[in-house]
Amino acid sequence: MAVGIFDSGLGGLTVLDAVARRLPDVPFVYLGDNAHAPYGVRTHDDIFNLTCGATERLWDEGCDLVILACNTASAAALKRMQETWVPAQKRVLGVFVPLIEALTERQWGDNSPPREVAIKHVALFATPATVASRAFQRELAFRAIGVDVEAQPCGGVVDAIEQGDEILAEALVRSHVEALMRRMPHPQAAILGCTHYPLMQKAFQDALGADVKVYSQANLVAESLTDYLTRHPEFHGSGTRSKFMTTGDPSYVSSKATQFLRRQVVFEAA
Ligand code: DGL
């Protein structure tokens, strides 16, 4: 039984870390498409084709359930994949919905009509492709009314993280937060809508100030995956071994992953 975790690069490791802690007996196969990152500046067709290719690779590893630990792929490709491409005996899930359910005070899978919620002003930080898709606003509108969302496309941040340039990534985070706060001076909550951004969570929180509640996805996704696997044990898959795969250079990706997670991570070629 193995579950696949996919991201364009290193960001999904933040999700992998949380789900592996929550489900220590489940083998996880991680695939980072580092050769094609960042996805956030690509067209939706390009993101769809790359994400389908990576998902098939994870199916070959015995993962019948694949989590897109990538907001860009979840926003730009997931709906089309589910409607036109995923066969009946497989599942592909994204990372958006658990986050929006937490923000809108809902239990998993509560599909009741939209209602007023406590949070009224939300800052969304995400890649340009995720912001352009408006998928976050769409999912939010199904669940809440009267929430004002200001979205900031954070160009350059994923690239800087993939290259291991933390100083540049921090400077970019500060300037994206300032840009957003010129348009929305007092957000109540901030969504880190890219799985790379928890690696910069302190920089976001420092720039936003202590009063702003920062939501990041890793733990929320871990809880909802646990719930999903309890309800659907048939999607545990036939794979038996955890591993890390990359379409990029395995030794370079291993060293960056080890630096970010502060524990040794060894990638092999996909
Ligand atoms: N970590 C991804 C996300 O959540 C990918 C970003 C990218 O490749 O641009 O959006």
Image: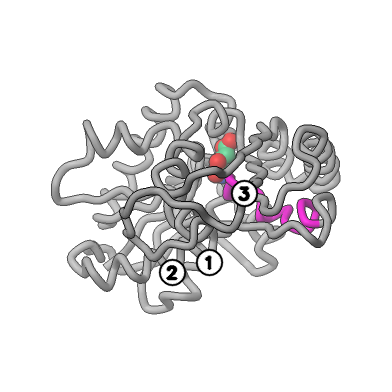
Amino acid identity at mark 2: Glu
Give the percent coordinates (x, y) of residue 210.
Answer: 81, 61
Q: How many marks?
A: 3
Give the percent coordinates (x, y) of residue 52.
Answer: 33, 35
In this view, the residue farthest toward the left is: 88
Which residue has dot 1 on it? 219
Q: Residues within 10 Å of mark 3 (few under 14, many from 20)?
A: some
Viewer-side residue, 115 vs 136: 115
Give the percent coordinates (x, y) of residue 136.
Answer: 50, 40
Dividing the picture into quadrants, the one containing residue 155 is top right
Residue 132 in view (yes/no): yes
Give the percent coordinates (x, y) of residue 180.
Answer: 76, 36
Residue at coordinates 44% horizontally, 29% vertically from top-left? Answer: 47
In the displayed structure, 158 sits above or below 21; it is above
Side of 210 relative to 5 (left or right): right
Which residue has dot 3 on it? 120
Residue at coordinates 64% horizontally, 35% vertically from top-left? Answer: 151
Q: Quadrant of ligand 1?
A: top right
Question: Is residue 146 in the magenta section?
Answer: no
Are the residues tagged 1 and 2 within 8 Å (C-beta)? yes
Q: Which residues are magenta?
A: 193-205
Residue at coordinates 66% horizontally, 46% vertically from top-left? Answer: 121
In the displayed structure, 71 sits above or below 107; it is above
